Amino acid sequence: MAENIPIEEYLQQISHATDIIQSKINANPAISKPRVMIICGSGLGGIADILNPKKKIEISYSQIPGFKTSTVQGHAGKLVFGLIGENEVPVMCMVGRLHFYEGYTFQQTTFPIRVAKELNISTVIVTNAAGGINESYKPGELMVIEDHINFPGLAGWHPLRGPNLESFGPRFQPLSDAYDHELRKLFVKTANNLGIKRPIHEGTYFFAAGPTFESRAEVRAIRVLGGDAVGMSTVPEVIVARHSGLKVFALSLITNAGVGEKPPSALHENPKALDEGMASHAEVLETADEASKDVQKIIESMVNEL
Ligand code: HPA
């Protein structure tokens, strides 16, 4: 398992990456001061397509020192800078995110958030694909994240573990206000104004480190603990964003239903097959693809108001 690098070196990496990015986007003054960062979840990379194609700059992660490259299908690895909506809101989209299960440290997976702060971005919109834990949630539905459970974090695998980055935020960051209330209201209002029919829930995201999808007993355990959806991302980024003083909105697209029923018994006949409802990455990408147009529409209209 990779280790954190010393913070002096980390801070230097952040400022070096910021300088390189800023020098590239300065080529187009209209987009050179992004205000909003959008992190595209699995299969949601199409969000970057809502940027005005005439004024867009793409920078692949491999061109930015300190940025690691995503190894997961459905996650390209590039930053896309451009404008959203009639109000031409300047944004930075992260197409392809980094996950802890890929073997990266939290320092590496949350590096882009620190860079966003240095670029003077003030709001982060985080999207993800997630498994439904709440039994009323169906694949294709949306969940506005109102709170989270940082399961690895409670056991010490925490993105803020180690020396505190004092220039960004406090040692003991409160998280009771992590998911901005006004932004959540704006998302719901925007979806209603657009006449989106897809059900929108509000609930708690449970961060599991992955990369396995949950066992049946884990699904039941997460339900008991209060998770409504489960996924392998988002929470480290949200924590580091809050530590950096950024406002956060986060959205889960429910791509599959967690299987929490007991497996068929060996002791008596059971009509259900063991692989019924089994999660797969292909299903995750397929459902995300279908729902992504609605997500894009809502985010476009919402960001236009920021
Ligand atoms: N579990 C964890 N992560 C996920 C899932 C899931 O069921 N679906 C999409 N991401």
Image: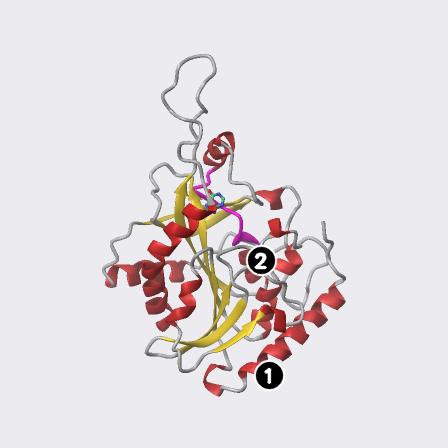
Viewer-nearest residue: 133 or 166: 133
Question: Residue 112's spot in the image, x, y percent?
Answer: 59, 66
Question: Residue 264's spot in the image, x, y percent?
Answer: 44, 21
Question: Residue 17's spot in the image, x, y percent?
Answer: 64, 74
- 92 is within the stretch colored magenta: no
Quadrant assignment, res 9:
bottom right
Mark 2 surroundings: few (<14), some (14-19) or many (≥20) residues within 10 A: many
Q: Earlier in the sequence, mark 2 or mark 1?
A: 1
Viewer-nearest residue: 27 or 107: 27
**Residue stretch in magenta:** 226-236
| 1 left or right, relative to 289 | right
In the rendered image, the vertical position of residue 12 relative to residue 144, given as above or below: below
| Residue at 59% across, 69% down | 61
Type of amino acid under label 2:
Leu
Viewer-nearest residue: 238 or 78: 78
Viewer-nearest residue: 92 or 288: 288
**Separation of disc 2 and disc 1 at Cα?**
24 Å
| Residue at 53% across, 57% down | 238
- 230 is within the stretch colored magenta: yes
Type of amino acid under label 1:
Ser
**Helix, strand or loop status at disc 1:** helix
Q: Is residue 144 visible?
A: no
Question: Which of the image's four quarters has the C terminus?
Answer: bottom left
**Helix, strand or loop status at disc 2:** loop
> Colour mode?
secondary structure
Residue named by callout 1: 23
Residue named by callout 2: 98
Tags 2 and 1 touching, CB below 8 Å: no
